[in-house]
Image: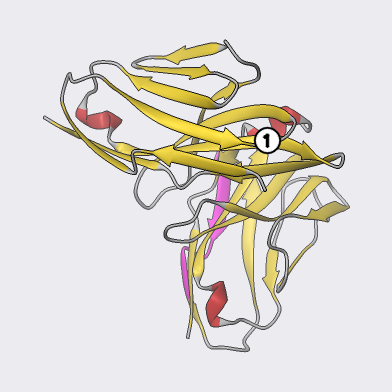
Amino acid sequence: EDQVTQSPEALRLQEGESSSLNCSYTVSGLRGLFWYRQDPGKGPEFLFTLYSAGEEKEKERLKATLTKKESFLHITAPKPEDSATYLCAVLSTYYGNNRLAFGKGNQVVVIP
Amino acid sequence: NAGVTQTPKFQVLKTGQSMTLQCAQDMNHEYMSWYRQDPGMGLRLIHYSVGAGITDQGEVPNGYNVSRSTTEDFPLRLLSAAPSQTSVYFCASSYRVGVPSYEQYFGPGTRLTVT
């Protein structure tokens, strides 16, 4: 069964204190890995898609990387506005059908 | 553009009642989908559509129906509400199918409580 595990579940950071979020997965036939940001009471907002091991994507203070078993979302010098829940999702194929599995999220609080 | 809109924002139903959650997008997106989000669980796909007139089941389709008569609208129908359907429901859309379908724009959500 496909599994997506995000760690840590919750993280408190001081403003400017860089850190990384982890998304580990066990799937067959990985087709893509997605990162979303979700603010309280709102829908997820798309951040990145990663397709193959070794790929990296950046956006402002966020950088996503992918290996064969996990992805990291690095937050460099975070600001309070980076406080959110970050969701990881993995797309795989199973007997020719696409399957998308979301992790439970990494809740990040950045303290001024 | 308004993006993806959902109505209502909040709803309380009694067990056995039926209702329709509305979703509309004004971006001419092909791909639309419905998810539910429950505490301690990841988002789970209910139904999706790759274009007008085409729908398919996701991971948790039981108790829900969908139709897609236009590109813009993708309503979700609860046939006979049950307490297990208490959740936050999100509609999402994407401008193309295939792997990029999952680079989605999400609506603000509908918080549904079934008593």
For the view shown, which residue lies furthest in the left direction?
A112
**Identity of the residue drawn at 61% across and 15% down:** A53
> Which range of residues does the magenta coloring cover?
B1-11
Residue under pointer 1: A91
Q: Residue at x 78, y 37 (%)?
A: A93
Q: How is the image coloured?
A: secondary structure
Question: Which residue occupies the foreground of this view, A1 or B94?
Answer: A1
The chain to which mark 1 is attached is: A
Q: Is residue B51 above or below residue B36?
A: above
Question: For this rendering, which residue is in front, A60 or B40?
Answer: B40
Mark 1 nearby-residue class (10 Å; few <14, some 14–19, many ≥20):
many
In x, y percent, where is residue B86? 50, 73
Residue A66, position as x, y percentages in the image: 54, 19
At horizontal 34% and vertical 44% (from top left) the residue drawn is: A9
Residue B107 drawn above or below residue A55: below
Choose between B56 and B106: the one closer to the eye: B56
Residue B21 appears anywhere in the view: yes
Asked if residue A72 lies left or right of residue B106, the reply is left
Which x, y percent locates residue A2? Answer: 65, 44
Q: Is residue B2 magenta?
A: yes
